[in-house]
Amino acid sequence: MDISLRNVIKSDWDYILTLRNNKKFKNNFIDQHQISKNEHYNYLENQKSNPNFFNWIICSEKINAGYVRILDNDVSIMIDEKFHNMGIGSKSLKMLEIESKSLGISKLVGRVMCENKSSEKIFQKNDYKLKMYWFEKEI
């Protein structure tokens, strides 16, 4: 399956919001609240001026298959459920690494929730090394 990355444009913002608010993805973020359209649009508008923010739509034969972004070297990947288990996450990460080098980024980090085995698998498959555990407690 051929995939490509293309820069996000404003007309993609609703698609990204749909992915982000999907229960499967939402549970893989530290902040798990349902994001409003206004909140999402404000966030993406503000990120336009952030020199450490880059984002792309993952395309499979010109069809949106997911979203990938880098924020301060932290990688986030969301693959549309219709495209799960097709290797798109790994292929996208490899393509993202090439884009990162061209942007002058020399290190990427994948912060993965413990329960998110699919993301863990993608990063391990692409030779990312586990560097630390993060423990926290609500008090």
Image (tube, helix red, strand yellow):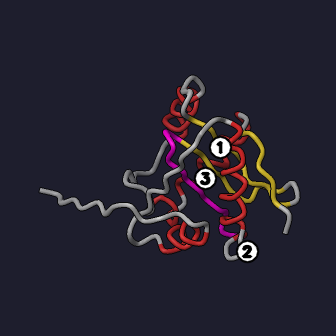
At label 3, the amino acid type is Thr
Q: Looking at the image, tell me whether mark 2 or mark 1 is earlier in sequence order.
A: 2
Quick check: marks 3 and 1 in contact, CB under 8 Å? no
- Residue 92 place in picture, x, y as percent: 70, 58
Of the numbered discs 3 and 1, the one sitting upstream in the chain is: 3
Label 2: state its secondary structure: loop
Going by the numbered disc 2, the residue's amino acid type is Met
Instruction: Identify residue type, mark 1.
Output: Ser
The vertical placement of 66 against 43, above or below, is below
- Residue at figure coordinates x 73%, y 35% from the top left: 9
Quarter residue 66 falls in = bottom right
- Residue 119, horizontal then vertical, whole percent: 53, 67
Where on the picture, by quarter, is residue 51?
A: top right
Determine whether 113 is above or below 85 in the image. above
Q: Give the CA separation, mark 3 to mark 1.
A: 25 Å
Looking at the image, residue 48 lies above or below residue 28 = above
> Gap between marks 2 and 1, in whole Å?
23 Å
Give the residue number, with chain letter if any, for mark 1: 100
Between label 3 and label 2, give the one nearer the viewer.
2
Q: CA distance from mark 3 to mark 2?
A: 21 Å
The magenta segment is 71-82
Quadrant where the C terminus is found in the figure: bottom left
Instruction: Identify which residue, 53 or 39, lies in the foreground.
Output: 53
The local secondary structure at tag 3 comes to helix
Q: Residue at x 72, y 66 (%)?
A: 88
Which element type, helix, strand or loop, lies under badge 1?
helix
- Which residue corresponds to the image point at 86% horizontal and 63% vertical from the top-left? 2
Q: Where does label 2 land, which residue? A: 86
x and y percent of residue 99 in the render? 71, 44
| Residue nearest the viewer, comparing 60 with 75 | 75
User: Mark on residue 18?
Assistant: 3
Q: Nearer the viewer, mark 2 or mark 1?
A: 1
